[in-house]
Image (tube, grey):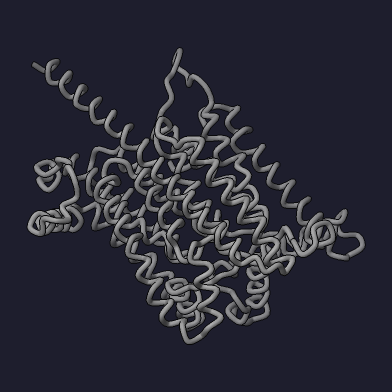
Amino acid sequence: RLWRSISFHHNTDIYLGFFYPLLLRVFLSVYLPSLLDSGTLIPGLKYTDVDYYVYTDASNLIGDGGNPYDRHTYRYTPFLAHVILLINSPWNALWRCFDGENDGQIFGWPYVNEGGRALFVLSDVFCGWLIISLRSHLHPRPKKDGCDNKIDTAGLFWWAYNPVAIVICTRGSCEPFLVLLPVLLAVHFSIVAAGRRRPPSMWTSAAAAGAALGLATHTKLYPVIYVPAFVARLSYLEGMTTGRLCWTAHNEALPKFPWDRPRTLLRYALLWFRRVFGVTSARIFLLFFLVFFCGTSAVASKLYGSEALDHALLYHLGRLDHRHCYSAFWYWIYLSGARKAHVSMSRAATALSSLPQIMVILVSSVGIAPYDLPAALTVQTLFFVAANRVATAQYLTWWMALMPLCNGRQGVSLVAVVVVIVALLVWSAAAYWLEMRGAGNFLILWGATIMYWTGNVFFLVDFMSKYGKVGAGHARQQKIDQSSKKEHDD
């Protein structure tokens, strides 16, 4: 059922949305490492992500009967190293059959331990495939003569031919496999729940969504911010379908959030308590989320002790890393790391920086997620990445994978896109001269991070302004449809 639900509607889509993107990624993952990893073309710069060497070294340690956390800077679930070992063993044996000189290369391509990169590339292509399918379910295109009018070009090029997504996966980043694919599957199951009219069917979709998000949270932790949004969406779907009073009798929109009215705020909190724990779909989602998140974490802890929890989960809660970091906190973290006496104070101060993120997550989960889950997830991820203490290039794919699921008329202005791109280019140039050439341009790089943060905020504000206009239009259209239906019934 899952395979049929995410299949393409055109034979052309199969080539444009799957085979051509796959061939492009395979070519780049073979050619660019062979060209750049030697460091002779661009001094000090390699194409392969340094983390990919960390993954493969950890998997080799497991193959030798060791502990993956003996590899310095391995901060991931141990199951990632197990999967890479499982892929690399037959991969190396297969390509060794064609290696006549037995030097680990075929026509200059170093094939040894490249199976993990191939897995990440394939996962990235499946992410694009899933994005196109989800767009067809969320925003069906008009039909002529019983068939689709045209191919979803925007969906194809947003991810399948997106240079950021292509570079991230071909460099050997695990993001598509480890987190993007399970998050998109969780969104898919929530959309399946929206198309069902019987509670037992909704419960099945809620369980699948909870399991997928639980696995994603175990592997990367940040998807935990999506839990309130999924709970609100699933509760709304079942509540409105079955006529729960907590939804049908209290579904009016507030003119503004009641920050200055404690009694109204308390009533609102109690209402949402009933919506979360009084609707079966929401409870089932939470149950399966906790079972899969806690279950996988418990198994990892059983296999490798407290190191699995310390490095894969707890480390990321208080992570302060100034290397390859886009965050506006970069210079602050760099200085506090140089002066050990100020580290604890910096950690406390950066913990306070999480408060705006929590507020955005809660408000968007309450105000947007019940009616438009992809928009709520996009807003949460955009602000989470922009305001996070640590932000790397991989974090861009977190919201890029969700934005095409929003309404096509929503979008953002070209100016907002240009601001973010210029900020990234300035940062990349400054970071290269600092990290690769040893230039002391700390203040320039800090200015680039401030520019990047400003660009992200401008991007988010523009996105929300367009969302408000589209949402108001949908609300007016729904009222018109309801009035027309009532008149027809009369």
Q: Note whether 307 is above or below 440 in the view shown.
A: below
Judging depth in this view, the residue of 53 and 440 nearest the camera is 440
What is the quadrant of residue 38 in the picture?
bottom right
* Quadrant of the rendered image containing residue 484: top left
Q: Residue at the spot x=62%, y=33% of the render? A: 16
Query: Which residue is painted at 74% across and 66% down in the image?
Result: 437
x, y (%) of residue 151? 53, 26
Left or right for 230, reference 297: left
Q: Is residue 52 visible?
A: yes
Residue at the extreme bottom: 341
Quarter of the figure that contains the N terminus: top left
Q: Which residue in the rendered view is the most extreme toward the top? A: 145
415 up-or-down from 36: above or below? above
Q: Position of residue 358 (x, y in %)?
A: 32, 61
Looking at the picture, how far across and down is residue 155, in whole percent? 52, 35
User: In the image, is residue 477 above or below residue 272?
Assistant: above
> Is residue 5 something that shows in the picture?
no
Q: Is residue 414 left or right of residue 351?
A: right
- Res. 129 image quadrant: top right
Count of marks, rendered view? 0
Task: State left or right for residue 61 relative to residue 234.
Answer: right
Q: Position of residue 319 (x, y in %)?
A: 48, 73
* Quadrant of the image containing the C terminus: top left
For this rendering, which residue is in front, 73 or 55?
73
Relative to 324, does residue 241 appear above or below in the rendering?
above
Q: Which sits in the foreground, 447 or 345?
A: 447
